Amino acid sequence: MNEPVIARWALIRDMLVFQVKLAMDAIRDLFLSPVSIICGLVDILKGHSLSQSYFHKLMRFGHKTDSWLNLFGNHNTGAEHINVIDSQKAKADVNVDQLFSQVESLLKEQHGKGGLTASAKATIDRYLNKIVETKTPSDKQR
């Protein structure tokens, strides 16, 4: 059974998206850690009920940001798929993957027009091909 080869640019895109999402998750965690302690202490001192609890409100907010980040979700969704999702969901349900897909669509549009991204992509492709070519002869000797 032949397994499909991962396209170079798709893999690069997926890696970049994942790294940005990891950074966003880390920043969120750095923010939520001290805020959760403060919220918990305020709840303890004020004797808040569950519905008034700042800590539990923060937990609900954290859950929403988990869904929004979709850290380990499908990074390789096409713009067509996103358009279907957009038509089915409210604007409030937009997540990071959809935002990245919109940016990717814009870059592809610019690339199609022969803009800066076309020359940058060609240059990067040329360098990556050189790296692969220099690696390939030594791999054949093994």
Image (tube, rainbow, N blue to C red):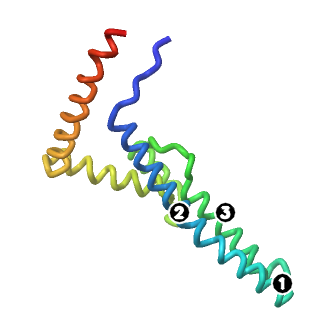
Residue where numbered disc 2 is placed: 90
Kindly state the secondary structure of the residue where label 2 is placed: loop
- Give how far across and how far down residue 87 sits, in percent: 47, 55
Q: Amino acid at mark 1?
A: Ile
User: At x 40% / y 29%, what residue is drawn?
Assistant: 6
Q: Nearer the viewer, residue 75 or 122?
A: 122
Residue 32: name its quadrant: bottom right
Q: Nearer the viewer, residue 93 or 138?
A: 138
- Give how far across and how far down residue 7 sits, in percent: 35, 31
| Pair 3/2: label in front | 3
Kindly state the secondary structure of the residue where label 1 is placed: helix
Q: Which label was assigned to residue 63? A: 3
Q: Which label was assigned to residue 44? A: 1
Residue 98: name its quadrant: bottom left
Q: Which label was assigned to residue 75? A: none
Q: Earlier in the sequence, mark 1 or mark 3?
A: 1
Q: Amino acid at mark 2?
A: Ala
Kindly state the secondary structure of the residue where label 3 is placed: helix
Along the horizontal axis of the image, is 9 left or right of 87?
left
User: At x 34% / y 33%, what residue is drawn?
Assistant: 8
Q: Amino acid at mark 3?
A: His
Q: Earlier in the sequence, mark 2 or mark 1?
A: 1
Would you place residue 45 above or below residue 108 in this image?
Answer: below
User: At x 43% / y 50%, what residue is drawn?
Assistant: 17
Would you place residue 79 above or below residue 129 in this image?
Answer: below
